[in-house]
Image (cartoon, rainbow, N blue to C red):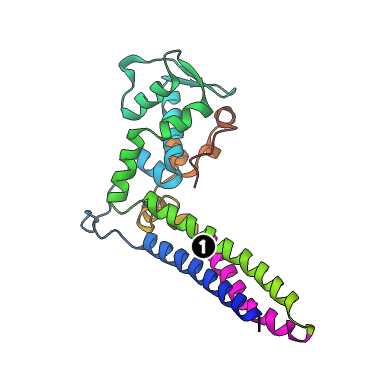
Amino acid sequence: MIWVPLLLVACVVAGVGCARVCRATLAAALPDAGDPRGGADPELTLHEAAYLAGGPLRVTDLTLVSMHRGRRLLLAHTGWATVVDAGGAGRDELERAVLGAIGPEGQCPIPSVRPVVAADASVRCIEERLVGLGLAVPAAGRREVAEGLRAVKAGFLLGLVLGTAAALLVPAAERALVIAAFTLPLLASGLCLLIGLVERYPYTRWASPAGQRLLSGLSAADPLTALATRGPAVLEPELRAAFRGQDTRHRP
């Protein structure tokens, strides 16, 4: 019965990983107990909608395109951003962050601008407000789900390795029993991993269920609203070309 300790190890590791994913997903789906809304849904600004739909980089994309349409910035199809009108040094904190990321030369590749603006304090303020309203999932919650999924993957792979080793260590007559026994932790890990990957969006990427409900009520008739909720894919070909090859370091 040398395979029994191996089975116990596989079951414990699989159980811990599944428990972490379930706990993190449930925590992300529950409304914030400190939600100050008093039952009334707040109105989202475009930048808040962009954050809920696509995170910090979507907020950056919206700001860049808004400045481009306002003729304060030129987004070339070659992937460069050029300052056209720096009058007033930007109309708000986000625009000032864009101008600061481009630098005094007034021209910079868009992939270099995006992560700098996405990490700016003005974007963090948007995140903090949305988290405080119970509309966005905190960064800690996203990390916990990601770590839980990694634990489940590790448990699944460990179960495969231990099951294979156990099957090779026992006589041929006992292999069917060993394989059947190891099916339980493997099945649990596989199902939990599948559910976690399916449920990761929308509940644990950026928007909470309450935030998703507000996003679903937005009309995409306005081009900037469509960009905020759907991303650069809705832009005209020239602007899509400008964002092609963009940095994805801030994606979940």
Decide whether the magenta segment is chiefly helix, strand or loop.
helix
**Height in image: 51 above or below 89?**
below
Give the SS element for disc 1: helix
Q: Percent from the top left, x then y, of residue 160?
A: 66, 68
* Furthest residue in direction right, as rendered: 172
The residue lying toward the viewer, choosing from 100 and 221, is 100
Q: Kindly indicate the quadrant of the structure image that contains residue 7.
A: bottom right
- What amino acid is at disc 1? Gly
Q: Give the residues drawn in magenta, as a range.
A: 173-197
Pinpoint residue 156: horizontal percent, then vertical percent: 60, 66
Residue 17 placement (x, y as % from top left): 50, 66
Provide the residue designation for mark 1. 196
| Residue lying at 47% horizontally and 64% vertically, measured from the top left | 21
Residue 177 belongs to magenta span: yes
Residue 162: which quarter of the image?
A: bottom right
Q: Vertical placement of 197 versus 97: above or below?
A: below
Q: For this view, does 47 lie left or right of residue 75?
A: left
Q: Nearer the viewer, residue 215 or 179?
A: 179
Q: Is residue 37 left or right of residue 161?
A: left
Q: Where does the image place residue 29, in percent across and percent down from the top left?
A: 38, 62
